[in-house]
Image (tube, coloured by chain):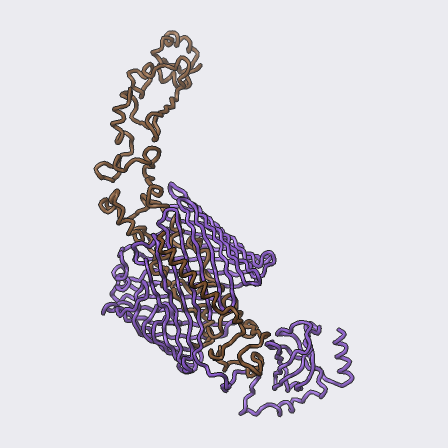
Chain colours: A purple, B brown
Amino acid sequence: MRAAWALLLCAAIAGAAEVRGKVTQVVADAIYVDIGSSQGLEPGNGGQVQRVGERIADVAVVTVSGEQARLRVVRTVRRPVVGDDVVFQIKSTPQTKAETESKRPPADQPFEPLLERQKRRAKVVPERNIFHGRVSFSQVVQSDNEGDLDYAISLLTSDGMLDRIAGSRWSMRWAGNAFYRTGEAFEGSEFEGGQLIVFDLALAHPVGEDGSFRFGRFLPRTLASAGYFDGADIDVAVGENTRFGAALGFRPTRIDLTPSVDEPTGLVYGAYKVGKRGDAFASGSYGLLASSWEGDFDRAALLIEQVAELGSARLDATATIDFDVGSSEYRSGTQLTQLDAFFSWRITRGITLRAGADRWQRLDTAAERDTIEFLDPLLFENGFWRTWIGAAFALPGRLRLDLQYDNINSDTGPTTTPWRVTLEHFDPFGIPGANLSLTVFSLESFTGSGYGGLFNTSVPFVGGKWVLRALAGFRYLDEADQTFDVTNVSVNVDYLAGGGWQISGGVQWFGGTALDSLLFEFRLDYRF
Amino acid sequence: MKLNAAKWTVGTTAILVLLVTCGSFRKGKQYWNSKWGPLVPHTSFPADCELCHYPDGWKKIRPEFEFDHAKQTGHALNGAHEGAACLRCHNDFGPIEVYTSRGCVGCHADIHQAQMGNDCLRCHNESSWRPTGLVADHARTRFPLIGRHVAAACVQCHPRGPTGIYRGAPLACEQCHQADLATAVNPDHNAQGWTSRCDRCHTPVSWGANGFSHSFFPLTGAHKTAQCQSCHTGGVFGPLPRDCLSCHQDDLARAPNHQDFPRQCEQCHGTTTWEDARFNHRFPLRGDHNVDCSVCHVGGNTASFTCLVCHDHSKEKMDDKHDDEPGYSYNSAACYQCHPRGDD
């Protein structure tokens, strides 16, 4: 208050004019404001940042342009944030409108604010071989009372990118897992021993402003339902809001993505976006997929991915419609083989409603049938429909209540209506970042019903370097002439060692009706 | 557990721990190696380099530099995103605005190939892709995890799980348990034609005796440990008569004084042993009624009884005694109707 009076006094003496603006950016030790030379600011001017009339920092103008200025913080009471007021007392009289117009750059020299994207490339270190990724190793060992669930799984996983290879605009991405499984649970099965799965191994090059070309092993980003390709794809922008793309190649085998030439596959797609996010927005991708299997036309499908936003309501949907191309043996006609539609609407800050529908059906194609070891007509049942509704309520005391009710309907399985109720507590006991949740849910099987509960917590400590995760669950099911109960307890600890390293370890116990198994887990992550 | 698995585990873990301890813990978030090139194509950055760099050295970012992603871009970086290298998202693979509008799958290749939908947060969170609470989440499927299924490795039921495909796990037991079916030779399941609907006899607890459900004829007492062939003679496992005598004819023949006993063995015997028979005689056998069975059940026929053979029960005396009783009749059924406990 005293400072405000002092400013007013100085202004009165000097005949200065007050210029007010807003803080638009806070970056490191600099502040950007939405007033500039047009309002009379000049390098060296001193002023104040105010919040609700109270001075929180003294600032000085460093650089200035027409409608913006970069300020240096001279003294701080509180850290300025975007939206704070900034007040300057300018000695010279404000410019008239004519003067301001005359100082603006001519029309053929567009105004370039300080934070505008640079039109020229600054001479910086040559961009070459930019290498980022992650490697992690995990080991899981389980020991069981009867022995048939004894197993050990070692997993080495890595994903990442090598960008600007040798200074060029070529880049490479990779992602893959290497498993080694052993133990009685896997004895004699196809999963015993090593297994290498490559999800992504592709070279890419930009096409135009926003397009790309790539070849190798990849999953089309725009329409993931197309599955993996060993081939090439191109994605180009046509106009600001429309894209087109195509992919051509061979589909790897379904079990472990081993390269194969049995299933040539092609995809063409278009994508669009309209509107503005946070207001009314929609984007979607629509593709046509065709494939053959060992020389015969096998599949034609329409792939859909759709996002729509209206205010705080959002719809996410993916769908696959398979056309009857004569390769089906168990079904005929066009089939909706996959659908997942999820709608959420944040009604108020404290209430969010959601609903969805989910549909799945196994593909009845020669490729699918030929890759199933024990072919059974039951596998080609009509699949299922699942619909659900739910709601989340923010409660006082950093609590959140979440309710969900499902309805699962299928020809071969039971029609079930599981429900669940979850109460979450954020930052419990004043520990920032901690989380506690308690869930109760119903269970329904073919011949019985029951209930379950789950307690889950995550607690960071030592400044977030360590995270303790604990879980305890209980399930009870009453079958026709028998009851089953299962209790599981797990404790895991993550240590964020710094430098990109993270170490995790934990133990999990399952106990209950004829069940007593212990699982140890160790994981090491390195991000580079 | 095979020993080689344990050795392999310990060995590999030790090597990796060694690598970590020898590795670089010292490189802070602000460290940058010029060989890497700029982390993000700088064409989209402010012209004022001093915002991030020292004027006299590019290799280190200003320690006080903090790029508030939420404020600067309107998109908050939470969980693992907070520590991710900028280039993982801002790169030459396409416009980030388009990708973010599609949610997680815009940047993260959806290894589930859209079969699980685009709402990744149903199972995953921003801190880790490793889902927790999946055992509970399985209650939302057509196959809630019961019994030993809870502790099974996912790939045992989801053979395409390692490639991200979890849809299509069979609902029928025999699809996953082909190996168990092939080794079920006592009795020989294939010979008997028991190749489906395993749940008729087995429970999710175990394939062995503990998990065997003979619910259509509960195996209690001595039946529990009996050999299947004791009842299912000749390898015939079809439905058997449920009455005791269909299997226990020889026992009846050996039993003393049972010639005239009813053929419902369960009226007196339990399933544990023949000796410990207990018969709940509805008519109290006490006092003058504690007599040999054949006194009332003439000729050993327990299906009928008589009250009239007793010396006390002469018709004249009874008629005289009951002359005030309406509906009185001198026959055993009438006696029992008014004197179910044998007293006055």
**Which one is in front, A383 or B178?**
B178
Q: Quadrant of residue B318?
A: top left
Place residue A171 in its image quadrant.
Answer: bottom left
Task: Report if residue B58 is visible in the image.
Answer: yes
Q: Residue at 40% across / 53% down in the picture?
A: A142
Vertical placement of residue B53 versus B256, above or below: below
Q: Is residue A478 above or below residue B77?
A: above
Name the spot of residue A513 as percent of width and height, x first.
Answer: 41, 44
Q: The N terminus of chain A lies in which quarter of the figure? A: bottom right
Q: Please provide percent x and percent y for residue A442.
A: 45, 50
Q: Is residue A422 above or below residue A109?
A: above
Residue drawn at x 29%, y 54% as measured from the top left: A188
Q: In this rendering, would A165 be left or right of A427?
A: left
The relative height of residue A282 versus residue B292 in the rendered view (above or below) is below
The image position of residue A467, as x and y in percent, is: 53, 60
Q: Is residue B314 visible?
A: no
Look at 29% across and 49% down and name the residue there. Answer: B180
What is the number of callouts on the image?
Answer: 0
